Amino acid sequence: MLPSSFRRVYWIDDGALSLGICSYALIDGADAIVYDTHVSREHASAIRGELERLGVRHIVVVLSHCHLDHIAGTEIFADCEIVASRLTRDLLSHRLTAIETGTSDAGPPAISPVILPTTVFEGQTQLAVGRLQVAVLQFNIHSADGVVIHLPEEGLLLAGDTVEDTVTYVSDPNSLESHIDGLERLRRLNTARIYPNHGSPRVLTASGYGGGLIRATQQYIRDLLRASHDPELAGLDLRSFVAESLEAGWITYFEAYERVHRNNIAKVAAR
């Protein structure tokens, strides 16, 4: 357990560990795609060490977006190809000094060095991991540089932070209408199994989420927009706010997201 002062100040806990976070690897023989590098060099080292124990010798990293809890371990993969959207690279480049000195808007701890993406794309690209062909797609959901990995033949989606369980973290309240549109595009991929970077361990280690997670996120954003001019709705606690999605079984309730929800309400009200 981290001391309370650490929990109040440091992004590594407030923005990541307190909610739970994971990254993913797609493996075929000696090849792997690593989707996000986690919250620290130590976490990234554990990921790489496990892959090498399994016989992986060639790694391609894909970054889901530029937020610190997803790019903090890039140094451990400095000898690998690192793929991201062009916007992710531009945002990281612009903020590089602040991130590496711990003076960015997110605050400390510093991440130094940050290894910038070596391969960038716009819109979409294709990657191969052994015999697996995957689509890497850009979405303006949660952040303008959001990137997901889609395996259409397997009906599988690695979703990054485009969806979360219990609710999305609003980073750009002025783009929420665009996020709803992006979620509809995401829904049309018709994936049977969705794996977000923040979700219930019980669900993630079973069969993942169904399309209901996307529908729950769309409804949550619509209700956030309604709450900006409906004081009664804005005053509900999270469990009551998302009661229909909980009853439908699309999401689970995690108390730590109560704080996220209150912050979301405040951001939307102030936009």
Image (tube, helix red, strand yellow):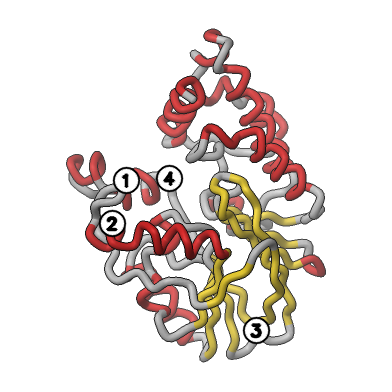
Of the two numbered discs 2 and 4 on the same chain, state the one appearing first in sequence: 4
Q: CA distance from mark 3 to mark 1?
A: 39 Å
Please name the residue that numbered disc 2 is placed on. 98
Mark 3, Cα crowd under 10 Å, few <14 / some 14-19 / many 20+, is: some
Mark 2, Cα crowd under 10 Å, few <14 / some 14-19 / many 20+, is: some
Tag count in the figure?
4
Q: Nearer the viewer, residue 153 or 54?
A: 153
**Amino acid marked by disc 4:** Leu
Q: Disc 2 vs disc 1: Cβ atoms closer than 8 Å? A: yes
Residue 152, image x, y percentages: 79, 66
Q: CA distance from mark 2 to mark 1?
A: 8 Å
Of the two numbered discs 4 and 3 on the same chain, state the one appearing first in sequence: 4
Residue 199, compared with residue 127, is above or below; it is above
**Amino acid marked by disc 3:** Asp
Q: CA distance from mark 4 to mark 3?
A: 30 Å
Please name the residue that numbered disc 3 is placed on. 28
Residue 160, image x, y percentages: 57, 55
Q: CA distance from mark 2 to mark 4?
A: 24 Å
Of the two numbered discs 3 and 2 on the same chain, state the one appearing first in sequence: 3
Mark nearest the camera among 2 and 4 is 2
Mark nearest the camera among 3 and 2 is 2
Q: CA distance from mark 4 to mark 1?
A: 19 Å
- Name the residue: 53% across, 83% down: 59
SS state under label 4: loop
Please name the residue that numbered disc 4 is placed on. 19
Please name the residue that numbered disc 1 is placed on. 105
